Amino acid sequence: MEPRIWLIAGPTASGKSALAARLAHEIGGEVVGADSMQLYRDLQVLTARPSPAELEGQPPHHLMGIADAADAWSVGRWARAAEPLIGEILARGAHAVVAGGTGLYFAALTEGLAEIPDVPEAVRSESAADFERLGEEAFRARLATVDPAAAERISPGDRQRLQRAWEVFAAGGTSLSDWQARTRPLLAPGSWRGVVLDPPRAALYARCDARLEAMVREGALEEVRALVARGLSPELPAMKAVGVRELAEHLAGRAGLAEALAAAQRETRRYVKRQSTWLRGRMDGWPRITALEPEAQWGQFLALNPSLTP
């Protein structure tokens, strides 16, 4: 079998890591992390990143635990690291198994990443003021005169994306849609095969709740305590990881442990819902695995990819 690229996407706690590791083991592959929080060394427990002990005897894993929490990684930075890495894995004669829950990472690989220039703060402030002054309907109508495609596709009530589309044009005179049309997929069409894990929501929520309880027992509080002690900006991506703010409230004495845990569980469920909604909207053509238990997931994966069955 020729080396190829396998993409495994799914919401938090859906079983991506286990499926990716098993696939890589079975076909002679290496795992590439596609999770924006598992990148950070400081967040092993709270992101369920495999520990060094868990990785013993496993296929090589990449782009996990490589960044400091003070270093903000973007989609573009991840993509610039992942593209050559995947090429190196294929050049070694191995398969690349890309797995994670950050949908934009997969979009960068399969659809392309628009390298849009930075928008000056003054332009962003003016755009926000214009939206307040004009209201959504008039703001959208103005956007339609310079970027009709964006004005058409952006959902009602999505102020952030409406303003973003206007800002890009106002800053450089080129519409957001034109920038996006210039993009190219980082992975060649036909070079990859993707799957989305989409287990029943109620069962997934229950797993998330139980996993957070286990994380607290296994060192999540100590992890958050060390992170908070660094005095990092709350705007850094690592500081926005689900569970950090909630457990920090407990450590600061502003919430009991049970209250903080419940808040973290609630926010995790909300995050899972957002992930699932995104994956269903942007990856609606990808095959789905609906099981939650590892053996059932593997069986469904093989059914979708019969060429892997001996």
Image (cartoon, grey):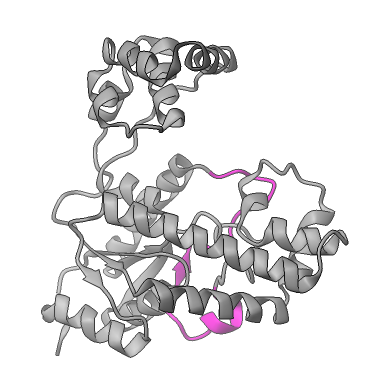
Measuring 28% from the left and 84% from the top, which residue is drawn there? 298
132 to the left or right of 264: left
202 to the left or right of 194: right
229 to the left or right of 123: right
78 over 268 or under it: above or below: above
Main SS class of the magenta portion in the image: loop
| Count of picture labels | 0
Q: Quadrant of the image for the N terminus?
A: bottom left
Measuring 39% from the left and 55% from the top, which residue is drawn there? 85
Foreground residue, 162 or 66? 162
21 over 104 or under it: above or below: below
Is residue 247 highlighted in magenta? Answer: no
Residue 239 at x, y percent in the picture: 68, 51
Q: Quadrant of the image for the C terminus?
A: bottom left
75 over 152 or under it: above or below: below
- Dividing the picture into quadrants, the one containing residue 264 is bottom right
Measuring 43% from the left and 54% from the top, which residue is drawn there? 274
| Magenta highlight range | 50-73
